[in-house]
Image (spheres, grey):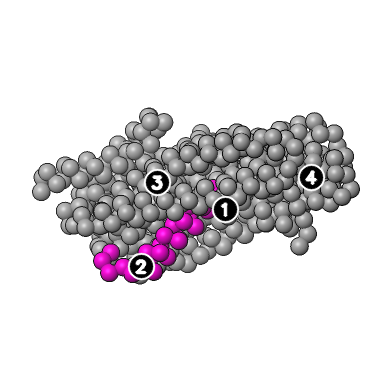
Amino acid sequence: MTGRWRAFLRLFAVQGAWNYERMLGVGMGYAAEPMLEDLKSADPGRHAEAVVRSAEFFNCHPYLAGLALGAMVRAEYDGVPGPQILRLRTALSSPLGALGDQIFWAGVLPSLLGAALVLVAFGHGLWAIGLFLALYNLCRLVTAVWGIQAGAASGMQVGSRITGSWLAGTAERIGSAAGFLVGLAVPMIIAWFLGGSDTRFIAAVLGVAGVTLGLTRRYGTVLTSLRLGLAALLLALLFFRGLA
Amino acid sequence: MHGLSLSTLATLLGWGTLVGMDLVSVPQMMIARPLVAGSVAGLILGDPEAGLRVGVLMELFALDVLAVGAVRYPDYGPATVAAVLAAVGQRWQVALGPAVAVALLTAAAGGWSMRFIRHANARSIQARSAALSAGESTAIRTLQYLGLARDLARSVLLTTLGLLLARLASPLVGPRLWPMALAAIAVGLAAVLDGALRSAGQGKRLYWLAAGLTAGTLWVLIR
């Protein structure tokens, strides 16, 4: 197995040692190790410096980490001065984080989950889950393979490679799809839960949901859905047990 | 949940652990999503309906969370696995409320546990700063494996906590608890809408969200 493929596999655990000090840094250093092996025999001094740099502070979306990894390793082999590589590392953090968050966390993931929930509402629960996992991981794997190859091919020019790539356009388009699919799924899945229920029951659910939504929109930093959920469950337990 | 074999409980614990590690550490292939975690837990326990119902409802809560950067967020995966145990073998309409309570408590504990191991990982880095500065690859490998081991331990403990809570909650489930299901569904609905509105902001996505909600509502009304 080549160093690049070993690095690719290690990227699946790039957040394995996530921490508040170096964030993804240790995971990146761990993934970089097999790709830097050839440098050890060619230039041991440079190799040691490259290993130090590889585990410095770094943060970006985990699925796009390969893009940065490939670029930084290529820069090490090209003999680019260390401070320039560290600047590249810093410069890549924010854009790769923002793009990855938009594409995956706020795009592909809610889109496919929305679609899966629609399928659940149609009675295809297990198919929905299988399809969700297959499609999501296909997107993720294709991105990861492309990322490490594009990064390694671009080196210090990785910025222009990102600008001219599919990433920016996808972020906008997938956001609209996510909005639509989650919107479509919500009434369908609520109907899946409440189908055949008494009208008063449905009205009560919608009423409580409306009040809760108002509270989370207004005081969301304190009144999270988790806290409100616990409070609502406790109130329901106490109030209705009292009545019973 | 009476009559559960030790092997079934061990399988459930193993599944919860995998799910817990998937959230952040490895491999992030989305088995940590409640929809997946709950459904598989339901299959393990021989009650796919309970797994799916709990999984879908907890997914509504999880869709409220945008797991970006260094924020602390609830760990809904192992929490959902545990919640399915609380709901299994009972009518979902009465079991859903206590099951969601188990899930929310476990998820909150999961959020705190992640913060704890992130600080522990940072302390390990500080302890090996000299080796890292010398470019020792073994130090990086050690830190990585320690981080993974910590998350493994965290996931085992979190799933165990959840299963214990489920064990406590399960005997309490009864017909009088249907209002808790109402509350759980209502807050789940509010959570997913809150998350969708926050992600949509004021841009084009908001219109697409409105279009989706309209289409979904029309489908519900005319079917």
Tell me if mark 2 has few (under 14), some (14-19) or many (20+) residues whose alpha carbon lies within 10 angstroms of its own.
Answer: few
Q: Which residue was labeled with disc 1?
A: B26
Against A129, residue A84 (above or below) is above
Residue A141 spot, x, y in % from top left = 65, 57
Q: Residue at x 34, y 65 (%)?
A: B49
Res A73 label? 4
Identify the residue position indicated by label 3 in the image.
Answer: B107
Chain of the residue displaying label 3:
B
A132 or A151: which is nearer to us?
A: A151
Quick one: SS at disc 3?
helix
Residue A97, relative to residue A136: is it above or below? Answer: above
Q: Residue at x 73, y 58 (%)?
A: A5
| Apparent side of residue B118 relative to residue A215 in the rendered image (left or right) | right
Give amino acid for label 1. Answer: Val
Subunit of label 2? B
Closer to the N terminus: mark 2 or mark 3? 2
Task: Evaluate whether label 3 is on the same chain as label 4.
Answer: no
Which one is closest to the eye, mark 2 or mark 1?
2
Q: Which residues are magenta?
A: B1-26
**Closer to us: B132 or B28:** B132
Co-location on one chain, circles 1 and 4: no
